[in-house]
Image (cartoon, helix red, strand yellow):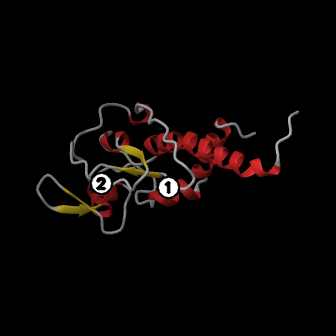
Amino acid sequence: MAKKPLSALTKDLRKFVEDGRAAAGPIVVRSLQIEGPWWTGNFGRRWKLRNAPVMPTDYKDGLNRGWPGDQTNRFYRPVPALRLSTRETLYIGNSVSYAGFAVNNPNATVTRPDGTKTTYENHAMRARITPPSKNPDWYKVYTASGGLFDDLTKGFRAAGAK
């Protein structure tokens, strides 16, 4: 077994963190696509990995298109890994214009076909919504359930951690 000097430890750790984070990014996105809110499929297709915040600026297709088929069999192309240095931040976000509404951010609205704006809670009173709880805080659903840490573990294992 070849021995390395202790001074190589930081370089090795940095590489491991960069590899693990790059591998975990697409896994996290896949979980958000499958476990997160859905209505049309557009929301799921617009999860992004970036080195800057992902802004909700994509207005193509709206909330009002029906989902084509069984929601449990949603297919999305894999998001490519994004390898960044440890000095850069990896952002995961959704670029669809109604992203804040879809994840139930406070005061986030979406414009209905009649031109009025509605919140997630108001929408839930009128329409079938995706979560069983009918009013989740999606961030807590994903983090409190352990989903985020499970996905990070999968990514770091894929990068070579035992």
Q: In terms of depth relative to the viewer, which is nearer, 52 or 87?
A: 87
Camera sees residue 153: no
Q: In terms of depth relative to the viewer, which is nearer, 155 or 102?
A: 155
| Amino acid bearing label 2 | Pro
Where in the figure is residue 45, as x and y percent of width and height?
35, 39
Earlier-in-chain disc, 2 versus 1: 2
Label 1 residue SS: loop
Which residue is located at x 34 percent, y 43 percent?
46
Q: Is residue 130 above or below residue 80?
A: below
**Residue most extreme to the right:** 1
**Residue most extreme to the left:** 114
| Amino acid bearing label 1 | Thr
Where in the figure is residue 30, as x and y percent of width and height?
48, 39
Q: In terms of depth relative to the viewer, which is nearer, 121 or 32?
A: 32
Q: Which residue is mark 2?
A: 56
Which residue is located at x 58 percent, y 54 percent?
145
Which residue is located at x 53 percent, y 40 percent?
27
Side of 108 where 15 appears, left or right: right
* Quarter occupied by the C terminus: top right
Which residue is located at x 25 percent, y 39 percent?
66
